[in-house]
Amino acid sequence: MRKPNDITLKEGIGKLLNVYKLKGRFDETSVINFWPELMGKAVANRTTQIYIAQKKLFVRIESSVVKNELLMVRTGIIQKINERAGTEVITDIVFL
């Protein structure tokens, strides 16, 4: 039986992340983790480095052709990432 002040595990972890101001960093880490799933196997295999600094996603791509394709759909990628994260985690993408 649930007591009135009981919360779910998800709510508890969310509150913990907010109290210790780790929510932003947690969201950034999750973006890096779901990059291969979001972009697909072909892009993930050509991605050599990925990191986030000041709400900018930096991605190093080996193939110039793939990099060019991704540059054309940059805004769509940003929207997909932020939808998946549930908050605005990324404002810009830089392809290296």
Image: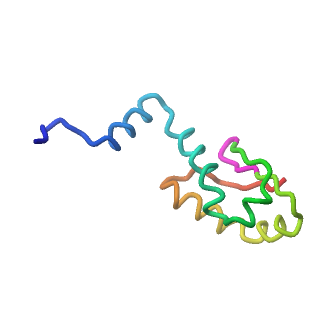
Q: Position of residue 77 (x, y in %)?
A: 65, 64
In the rendered view, tell whether residue 61 sits above or below residue 40: above
**Where on the picture, by quarter, is residue 47?**
bottom right
Asked whether 8 or 21 is in front, the reply is 8
Numbered-mark total: 0
How was this image coloured? rainbow
Q: Is residue 94 left or right of residue 90?
A: right
Q: Is residue 70 left or right of residue 18?
A: right
Residue numbers of the magenta segment: 53-58
Residue 77 forms part of the magenta stretch: no
**Where on the picture, by quarter, is residue 9?**
top left
Q: Residue at x 81, y 52 (%)?
A: 60
Q: Position of residue 24 (x, y in %)?
A: 54, 40
Q: Is residue 3 left or right of residue 77?
A: left
Dominant secondary structure (helix, strand or loop) of the stretch shown in magenta: strand
Q: Residue furthest right?
A: 64
Q: Residue at x 49, y 39 (%)?
A: 23
